[in-house]
Amino acid sequence: MAFIFRYDLEGLGFATAALGDGERTLELTATFHRDSLAEFAESVVRLTEGAGAAHAVFVDEFGEHHVEFRRAGEQVALSVTRHPDASNRELCPLGESAPVFSVSTTVTELHSAIIAALGRLLEVHGVAGYRAKWLEHDFPLEAYRSLAGA
């Protein structure tokens, strides 16, 4: 099963990310309050360079999802945990988090998936168009170039 990572700008300051293994997929909402795509891409850069762990956060209107990357050799385990904010306690009690998804892949598949997602965003929006839709953050061009050269 191949690792899947998709990232689509949905409107001004909103995006939808999806990650999965072909059988199961988790969709995450991201807002411009945090540069989630850059964090995800930079995490993949670090893992590609040999880091054993990395972290990215996707902030939505009601809390956030933390993506933890753990590398062991060529294998990478991703685990996603939901962290609620004070306005949405029904998801889980204030201050608590809940694991919501996990998937395993290889460094190579993770690398290929993020390169494809970033390339597609550049093709559709370009650097200036991405910035215009994402509002607060530039396209993660440095991470993209680093991954493309890897």
Image (cartoon, rainbow, N blue to C red):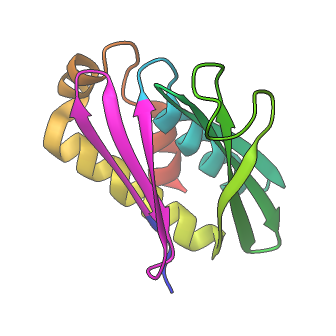
Q: Main secondary structure of the magenta part?
A: strand
Across and down, in percent, residue 2 comes to 48, 80
Along the viewing direction, whichever of 81 and 17 lies nearer the viewer = 81
Does residue 49 appear in this view? Answer: no
Q: Is residue 130 left or right of residue 20?
A: left
**65 over 147 or under it: above or below:** above
Give coordinates of residue 111: x percent, y percent. 53, 62
| Quadrant holding the C terminus | bottom right
Residue 102 in the image: x percent, y percent? 67, 66
Q: Residue at x 82, y 73 (%)?
A: 73
Name the residue at 52% across, 44% down.
Answer: 146
When asked about the image quadrant of residue 43, the answer is: top right
When the figure is inspected, residue 122 is found, relative to residue 19, above or below; the finding is above
Residue 26 magenta-highlighted: yes
In this orientation, does residue 73 appear? Answer: yes
For this orientation, the residue located farthest to the bottom is: 1
Magenta highlight on residue 137: no
The boundaries of the magenta stretch are 5-30
